Amino acid sequence: MPLIDSAYRTSGLFKNAHFATVYSAKLRPMPKLLQERERITLTDGDFIDLDWSFSEKPGKKLAILLHGLEGNSKRTYIKGQGKQCVQHGWDVAAVNYRGCSGENNKVYASYNAGKTDDLEAVVNFILKKERYDEIALVGFSLGGNLLLKYLGERKSLPKQIKKGVAISTPLSLKDSLEKLSQLNNRLYHTSFLYNLKKKVRKKLQQHPEKLSRKQIKEIRTLLDFDNVYTAPAHGFKDAFDYYEKNSALQFLHKIEIPVLILNARNDTFLSDNCYPVELASNSENIYLECPKHGGHVGFHLTNHCYYSEKRTVEFLND
């Protein structure tokens, strides 16, 4: 019965999905959070950077934070969530995916919505420290899909992983791509595509044998980008093969730990099947909360604390 009647309420302009989304991403004052960087060297010679924050009350609980498409550990939503976690007894490891920490990664591949082998490498790296008895995964947008797929596709998980929280998560990648391609989302589509094309131009300089200038010029949409780069770079036939194999919706019924999915009903990035009411109604582990408002990662309460940040800590500490 894990369908949750959301307590989130907002007013004024924050009822508008686009205002809530843009304000939270671009206008919210940056939360103050101390971060210490540590680099993980991967088995293929590449690297992932973690940014650590520590609770004032030393303990054995850790929240691993996973950012969204073209995000990083310095985004307001990561720092806001990290601040609430450390204030409530959780250490934080904010992950920067390959190529997202301010330095080009070394290999041609980078990250995607289903690259759970990299998440597994992060978890194993942390477990080797033997510092934490309780680990939670908290993901935003693409990061939410990543963690849900990770939790659902494996036959067994490390015993330390106790809970997960997925916020503003596109559970069906193809459908969310179609939503992002609509006219009302043109601002976000253009912004994502601009940043992704900048990165792929650097890939061309590093790996000219794998990509051409002509291919990059032909990228005019996110679908084009996934066909030209994401799919071939990560071993998929095409963009639709990538979407089909990595969408978290198909893995939800296999998740065996408590997970909160917090998706606003007015999130313009999400399709109808990103609100799996029937599945959650019959699940012991999938807690689905769908507030009327909130946009995409835009659950404003105050600039100091968002509802999603407060709700995440409540769920983890329950």
Image: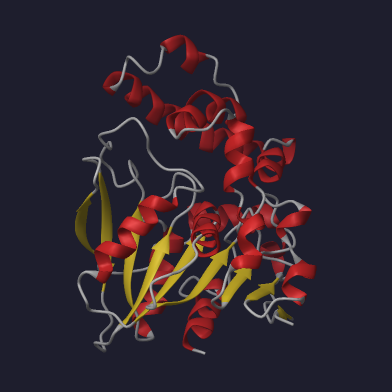
Q: Is residue 104 above or below residue 115?
A: above
Residue 40 in percent (x, y) is at: 22, 54
Residue 191 in percent (x, y) is at: 53, 37
Q: Nearer the viewer, residue 151 or 217?
A: 151
Instruction: Decide if residue 291 is on the left or right side of residue 223.
Output: right
Q: Is residue 154 above or below residue 206?
A: below
Q: Is residue 198 above or below residue 261?
A: above
Please say whether residue 72 is visible from this viewpoint: no
The residue positioned 68% from the left and 73% from the top of the image is 289
Farthest front residue in view: 155
Picture mark count:
0
The colour mode here is secondary structure
Residue 238 in percent (x, y) is at: 58, 28
Farthest top residue in view: 214
Instruction: Decide if residue 34 is on the left or right side of residue 244.
Output: left
Image quarter in which the N terminus is found: bottom right
The residue positioned 58% from the left and 22% from the top of the image is 220
Q: Nearer the viewer, residue 261 or 45?
A: 45
The residue positioned 62% from the left and 69% from the top of the image is 261
Residue 186 in percent (x, y) is at: 66, 36
Instruction: Decide if residue 300 is on the left or right side of residue 174.
Output: left
Q: Nearer the viewer, residue 301 or 2?
A: 2
Please say whether residue 288 is visible from this viewpoint: yes
The residue positioned 27% from the left and 36% from the top of the image is 104
